[in-house]
Image (spheres, rainbow, N blue to C red):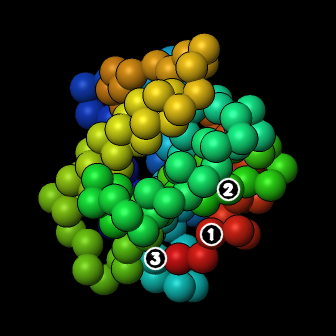
């Protein structure tokens, strides 16, 4: 069912987006930025994950405190959380929802809202760390699960649904 909803996101793009055998797929939202959709049947959860641009949290002393404080002080995250990936030293945006509460319309809205929050996070972090580049979302297309999904599998160990 969720795989059908994921496929519907790619309608018109010519690319087929679908879950792999581990229940994950990577979706490109800009030239160099992907989100990962992860469906965990064991926990009945759907999770969206994405690196927030290429800024590392060691590139600016104050950036870590500024960004992490947004988890508790901000309404613009719309239920998403910002975490840290110890391996890449990058910020990760995530949101999790129980599958039994999701229908196709809500899933599509959640993905769209997640992309909007990701863009806001990009802008916020870039305002704290000048000199970095960030692409804007240009639409959904299938992305290679290799690489990004492997990174997200590691990240998912640090972000609990």
CA separation, marks 1 and 2? 9 Å
The disc label shown at residue 56, or none: none
Identify the residue under disc 2: 84
Q: Nearer the viewer, residue 56 or 88?
A: 56
Residue positioned 46% across, 19% down in the render: 135
Q: Is residue 109 left or right of residue 84?
A: left
Residue positioned 42% across, 68% down in the render: 72
Image quarter of residue 51: top right
The disc label shown at residue 159, or none: 1
CA separation, marks 3 and 2? 21 Å
Q: Residue furthest front?
A: 62
Which type of secondary structure does the marked residue at label 3 adopt?
strand
Residue 116, position as x, y percentages in the image: 30, 41
What crowding class fits label 3: few (fewer than 14 Cα within 10 Å), some (14-19), or many (20 or more)? some
Residue 23, position as x, y percentages in the image: 57, 62
Residue 12, position as x, y percentages in the image: 25, 26
Lower position in the chain sequence, tag 3 or tag 2: 3
Identify the residue under disc 3: 45
Q: Is residue 63 left or right of residue 122?
A: right
Residue positioned 21% across, 53% down in the render: 109
Lower position in the chain sequence, tag 1 or tag 2: 2
Residue positioned 73% across, 54% down in the render: 85
Can residue 40 be seen here? yes
Residue 83, position as x, y percentages in the image: 60, 59
Check the picture and name the quadrant holding the N terminus. Answer: bottom left
Mark 1 against mark 3, which lies toward the viewer?
1
- Residue 120 sits above or below residue 108 on the image: above
Can residue 26 be seen here? no
Q: Is residue 45 left or right of residue 58?
A: left
Image quarter of residue 30: top left
């Amino acid at each position: 069912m969720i795989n059908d909803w994921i496929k519907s996101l790619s309608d018109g793009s010519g690319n087929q987006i679908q879950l792999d055998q581990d229940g994950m797929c990577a979706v490109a939202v800009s030239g160099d930025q992907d989100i990962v959709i992860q469906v965990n049947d064991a926990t009945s959860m759907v999770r969206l994950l994405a690196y927030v641009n290429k800024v590392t949290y060691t590139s600016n002393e104050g950036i870590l405190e500024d960004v992490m404080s947004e988890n508790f002080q901000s309404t613009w995250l719309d239920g998403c959380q910002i975490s840290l990936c110890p391996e890449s030293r990058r910020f990760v945006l995530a949101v999790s929802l129980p599958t039994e509460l999701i229908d196709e319309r809500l899933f599509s809205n959640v993905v769209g809202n997640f992309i909007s929050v990701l863009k806001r996070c990009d802008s916020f972090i870039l305002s704290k760390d000048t000199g970095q580049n960030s692409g804007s979302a240009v639409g959904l297309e299938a992305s290679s699960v290799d690489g990004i999904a492997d990174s997200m599998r590691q990240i998912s160990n640090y972000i609990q649904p």
